[in-house]
Amino acid sequence: MRKALIEQRLAMPDRLTRADLLQRVMRIWLVGRPDTVIGAYWPIKGEFDPLPALHRWKEDGELMEEPQRRRIGLPVIDKVHKTLTFHAWYPGCQMEEDAYGIPKPKDTELIVPTLLFVPCVGYSAGGYRLGYGGGFYDRTLAALEPRPFTVGLGFTNGFVPDFEPEAHDLPLDAILNDNGVVWPVA
């Protein structure tokens, strides 16, 4: 199922249009959120790129009547515990590849997000996410105290109506796609 969803995502002829729509959904969804530290991800395999919307969110915080210092973090793999920590990211910061060839911030400060955007290969009703199968996000979320508010990001065609979560799968607090908020259902 993962392979088919990734291939389908990579082959979307309107991926850029859908990405633009999801950027807008994300920016609107962030308005009024109290968070000042958000974790995200570096997009791979045709994933939606959340970083432009987050950079705009960060800049908006600096333009407020009472400026807020907002921070964005990207994951760094903890090889021992097979979990993720988040390190400060900003456009132009030095990057290096992790063990999986994914860019990560180099030598930046460890930060703890109160809101975490996670990529979805697929997603289903109830806020369940289908990832790449490594379990990094599930282990990370199970270990984080306090647990951040979690938001899945994916394209409309990533919805899997018959996906059955496993016992270790933790539901996300919200899921956004290019049509808007799909979880929780209003």
Image (cartoon, rainbow, N blue to C red):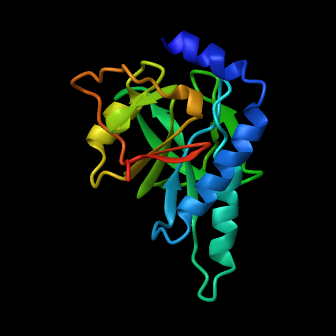
Asked if one can make out residue 89 in the rendered structure from this viewpoint, the answer is no
Left or right: residue 131 compared with residue 128: right
Picture quadrant where residue 18 is located: top right
Q: Position of residue 62 (x, y in %)?
A: 66, 76
Residue most toward the left?
167
Residue most toward the front?
186
Q: Where is residue 21 in the image (x, y as percent from the top left)?
A: 69, 47
Residue most toward the bottom?
65
Picture quadrant where residue 10 is located: top right
Left or right: residue 164 compared with residue 178: left
Looking at this view, is 40 or 173 the one in front? 173
Residue drawn at 48 percent across, 20 percent down = 132
Residue drawn at 64 percent across, 37 percent down = 48
Please give the count of numbered marks on the rendered protein: 0
Residue 1 versus residue 131 in the image, above or below: above
Left or right: residue 23 compared with residue 171: right
Asked if one can make out residue 126 in the rendered structure from this viewpoint, the answer is yes
Residue drawn at 64 percent across, 82 percent down = 64
Q: Where is residue 67 in the image (x, y as percent from the top left)?
A: 61, 82
Residue 16 versus residue 88 in the image, above or below: above
Residue drawn at 51 percent across, 72 percent down = 32
Q: Where is residue 115 in the image (x, y as percent from the top left)?
A: 44, 55
Looking at this view, is 109 or 72 the one in front? 72
Looking at this view, is 36 or 149 the one in front? 149
